[in-house]
Image: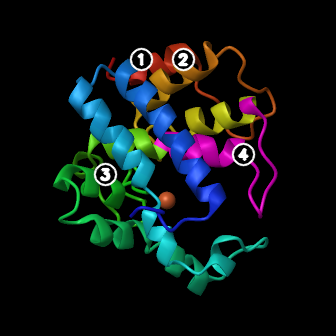
Amino acid sequence: MSELLLDANTKKHCIRTAKYAGVLALKLKRTPFEVCKIIFAALLHDIGKSKIPEEILNKPGTLTMEEMNIVRQHPQIGFEMLKGKVSDEIAEMVLCHHENVDGTGYYGKKASEIPIGAKIIRICDVYDSLSTERPYKAPWEQDRVFAYLVNHAGSLFDRECVLVFCRTQSGSLQRLPKESKRPVFGLQALRRSSSI
Ligand SMILES: [Fe+2]
């Protein structure tokens, strides 16, 4: 795993995701040992992409259904690559980093089956993906990214993770955009519906 076998952009994405995940895990009051494991899993979360053809990963246009099915294999591939080389917990976080709390993720796991570390990595991964330029899209404005995260609290993302992440990254949810297509949860509503 010395070179991680990943392209430069994916490596940078993994490093940024790990940074955000470490901060979020600390803010969520995970233990120092847990925080270290989450950071390590975040660094490795896309290792399975090293087995996905680059022309698919960097395709500028929309992926075909067949290409999408290939991309969707990368968490499982990463899990297989890491199994026996890292702790089971870390491998499981990598396996679950595209799972949604409403069960609509890559492998359909329910919220209770998704480790907290994977929920943390999920939101940090999406935040970084939306905030940065990709071959198929321009970077989104920060307000638009936060609106997306908040709008999908409780469906794609764990509510508490969204609340704490947005507080930490933006300092305030007051800056949410007015042009959001879906109704945006206010901070109060999110706090009420959150477990904290
Ligand atoms: Fe991924």
Please report whichever mark, 2 or 1, sits nearer to the chain's N-terminal start: 2
Q: Which mark is residue 192?
A: 1
Residue 1 as seen in the image, left or right of residue 51: left
- Seen at 60% across and 13% down, the residue is 171
The crowding category of the residue bearing disc 1, from other C-alpha atoms within 10 Å (few below 14, some 14 to 19, many at least 20), is few
Please report whichever mark, 2 or 4, sits nearer to the chain's N-terminal start: 4
Which is nearer the eye, 119 or 189?
119
Which is nearer the eye, 43 or 161?
43
The crowding category of the residue bearing disc 2, from other C-alpha atoms within 10 Å (few below 14, some 14 to 19, many at least 20), is some
Q: Nearer the viewer, mark 2 or mark 1?
A: 2
Marks 2 and 3, how far apart in space?
24 Å
Question: Vertically, is 64 above or below 194?
Answer: below
- Quarter of the picture containing the N terminus is bottom left
Please report whichever mark, 1 or 4, sits nearer to the chain's N-terminal start: 4
Marks 1 and 4, how far apart in space?
31 Å
Tag 4 residue: 132
- Seen at 68% across and 14% down, the residue is 174
Please report whichever mark, 4 or 3, sits nearer to the chain's N-terminal start: 3
Q: Which residues are magenta?
A: 123-142
Question: Vertically, is 97 above or below 16?
Answer: below
Residue 119 as seen in the image, left or right of residue 83: right
Asked whether the beta carbons under mark 2 and mark 4 sit within 8 Å of each other, the answer is: no
Asked whether the beta carbons under mark 2 and mark 1 sit within 8 Å of each other, the answer is: no
Where residue 104 appears, as percent x and y from the top left, is: 42, 59
Q: Which mark is residue 93?
A: 3
Where residue 126 appears, as percent x and y from the top left, is: 57, 46
